[in-house]
Amino acid sequence: MEKLVIIPTYNEKENIESIIGAVISMQQNYHVLIIDDGSPDGTADLVKSLFYKYPAQLFLEERKGKLGLGTAYIHGFRWALEKGYQFIFEMDADFSHNPRDLESLYAACKSGAGVAVGSRYVKGGAVENWPTNRILLSKGASLYTRMITWMPVRDPTAGFVCYRKEFLETINLAKITFVGYAFQIEMKFAAWKLGFKIAEVPITFRDRQLGDSKMNKGIVKEGILGVLKLRWMSMFKNYRKKVKNSYENNSVNFPQKEAVLESK
Ligand SMILES: Nc1nc2c(ncn2[C@@H]2O[C@H](COP(=O)(O)OP(=O)(O)OP(=O)(O)O)[C@@H](O)[C@H]2O)c(=O)[nH]1
Ligand SMILES: [Mg+2]
């Protein structure tokens, strides 16, 4: 039980089979956990049809509706801790993240980082064929986050990440409240505040070729307000105390706040 790649999915039927195949065929002992939010396009059924092919490596958790990326990952983290995985990865289903880069994230965590971030904005990192408005939004969000929080991470919204089990055990997952971009920022913020080493590994991020984007205005709004909230909490409230907790709270049975971002 060494390496688990968590892939959240919502309507990814065009990508799901090939992304699972790409990770497992590297033969580096990765297990894959799909967290599907009742995708109307039948993504979960496609995953189930692959169980016979990867009986020991592929797992699926199904939730009833679209509950957001952040809570999908938290569900996956609890699952991973329960099973005893050592290195837990976040990766998108749409091939924006190259599965080959999993190995550099793993190497960074193996050699001491609590969190390894696949970063577009460090030397050697890049973004390919993203429209200008998405690049501006992403770079703007990084700059904004760094200016407000002073967090020393160049790509704070990155969603290609490896966490050491010890970090996920140290934070109280029930207190991670954000769902979209802000979820990614908050996880790194928590790691920084709790004194875990954050390594940034250069990656090339590619725009999705197949399927539709789930990005929406609610996600951007949550990011803008969320960063201010994080800063506020760390200045005037004891953020570290709020977010730090014991392993028991992270068990799969612990009630989880399932925010529905779309309703905002
Ligand atoms: N389980 C679950 N997965 C989600 C949800 N929203 C997005 N995802 C998945 O999270 C990953 C990232 O979402 P994307 O739509 O690619 O978001 P993005 O990368 O910001 O936007 P684009 O690449 O432009 O489409 C993909 O694998 C999605 O299928 C959700 O509410 N629940
Ligand atoms: Mg994407």
Image: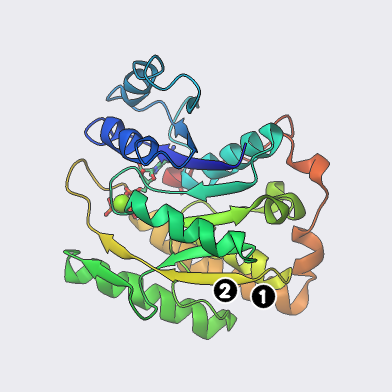
- The residue under the point 39% across, 17% down is 48
- The residue under the point 68% across, 50% down is 165
Circle 1: is it few (<14), some (14-19), or many (20+) Cα within 10 Å?
Answer: some
- Looking at the image, residue 238 lies above or below residue 242: below
Residues at circles 1 and 2 in contact by the CB criterion of under 8 Å: yes
The answer to which of 68 and 197 lies nearer the viewer is: 197
The answer to which of 42 and 95 lies nearer the viewer is: 95
Image quarter (top left, top right, bottom left or bottom right) of the N terminus:
top right
Q: Secondary structure at mark 2?
A: helix
| Res 129 → quadrant | bottom left
- Looking at the image, residue 38 lies above or below residue 246: above
Residue 102: image location, x then y, percent:
43, 53
Relative to 177, 120 lies left or right = left
| Res 205 → quadrant | bottom left
Residue flagged by tag 1: what amino acid is it?
A: Trp
State the separation of the CA atoms marked 1 and 2: 6 Å
Q: How many circles with numbers are drawn on the protein?
A: 2
- Looking at the image, residue 88 lies above or below residue 16: below
Q: Residue 228 has which mark?
A: 2
Q: Secondary structure at mark 1?
A: helix
